Image (cartoon, rainbow, N blue to C red):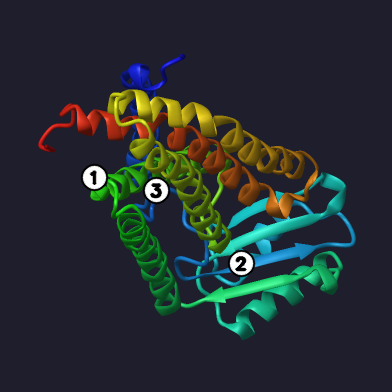
Amino acid sequence: MFSIVERRRWFFRLSGMVILIGIAAMVYSVVTLDTHTPFPMGVDFQSGTRFVLRFREPISEGTIREVFAHFDVNNPSVTRLGEEEDNTWQIRSEFMSADDSQAVKAALASEASIDDSKTEIDIVSPTVGAEVTRAAALAVFVAAVAILLFVVIAFRQVPNAFRYGACAIAAMMHDILVTMGFMAIAGLLMGWEADALFLTAMLTVIGFSVQDTIVVFDRIRENIPKRKNEAYETIVNRSILETLHRSLATQLNAIFVMVALLLFGGASIQQFIAVLLVGMVSGTYSSIFNAVPLLVAWEKGELPLLG
């Protein structure tokens, strides 16, 4: 029988390498970005104004910057969305009042007519941005505590039930760090910014990761009383192999959908889908190759400071 848990150190090393690359990218972002954050933060998490404008005729980036400079808005972030012929631009600037935002829009419309049906203007004050950031951190913390309590209660009849909850949290943190690392790299290379959809993707990734982990844990719980004469390591490995086809089938179906959306979906959801896809791939990996092998490593006393 092929043993996944015997090769656990290799899987742990691979995860550690990927996480370290992501952490390095986040540290670099903290040092180099003006916001001193692990990755560029969108208007949802800090004060600012975001314009998404579709022009009915071509307009250059230089013209857009000149209009903003006329209103004493220096160095806005100007990004083209979609294909060049779409004439759709996203502009992020410092915080502007609603009146100023409308004045800027009118000035841009005088340069090239704007399709109002495709126009979005989001304004977030410093207070609201700070509240959203705190709420995001609190949401992840509450999710982690809820998962730990649920797993400990659900597996209370299994010896060392706390370990199951702790290993599920460890796998979840693995997926969070991998996803954040990807976002940091994408921010450095492609200028992506974390927004409300990024938080949505992160919470979705947490859900997928924990769901897959619990499927394997549940099979371990079933096999322990059935196979009392087998070593714990053998029971765990058997449980992984028995649930492997279900885990892969479930996750691969979702991953294929994400790939299709990434290739053929609109530019407005590309970042969200990419983050979700990376998180789901990480969640599939961590559930099989991290969370469950961690149980064996803990049982064999291989984890420092944990008995």
Tell me if residue 19 can be seen. no
Query: Percent from the top left, x then y, of residue 21?
Result: 38, 30
Q: Is residue 149 left or right of residue 302?
A: right
Does residue 134 lie above or below 190 as drawn? below
Residue 5 x %, y %: 36, 22
In the picture of the structure, the residue carrying the numbered disc 1 is 159
Question: Could you tell whether 258 is left or right of 185 in the image?
Answer: right
Q: Which numbered mark, 1 or 2, is in the foreground of this view?
A: 1
Sequence-first disc among 3 and 1: 3
**Relative to the observer, which residue lies in front, 36 or 200?**
200
Question: Label 1 vs label 2: CA separation?
Answer: 53 Å
Q: Residue at x 49, y 57 (%)?
A: 203
Task: Give the mark, 1 or 2, whose residue is nearer the N terminus.
Answer: 2
Compare residues 21 and 207 and report the one nearer the observer. Answer: 207
Q: Given the image, on which type of amino acid does mark 3 rest?
A: Leu
Tell me, yes or no, if residue 282 can be seen here: yes
Q: Does dot 3 land on a helix, a strand or a loop?
A: loop
For label 1, the crowd category at 10 Å Cα-Cα, with few meaning under 14, some 14 to 19 and many 20 or more, is few
The residue drawn where x is 70% and y is 40% is 253
Between disc 3 and disc 1, the foreground one is: 1
Which residue in the structure is indicated by mark 3?
33
Say what amino acid the circle numbered 2 marks. Arg
Q: Which residue is mark 2?
A: 50
Write the residue at 55% across / 64% down.
93
Q: Position of residue 160 (x, y in %)?
A: 22, 45
What amino acid type should be assigned to the residue bearing mark 1? Pro
Using the image, determine if residue 71 lies above or below residue 149: below
Residues at circles 1 and 2 in contact by the CB criterion of under 8 Å: no
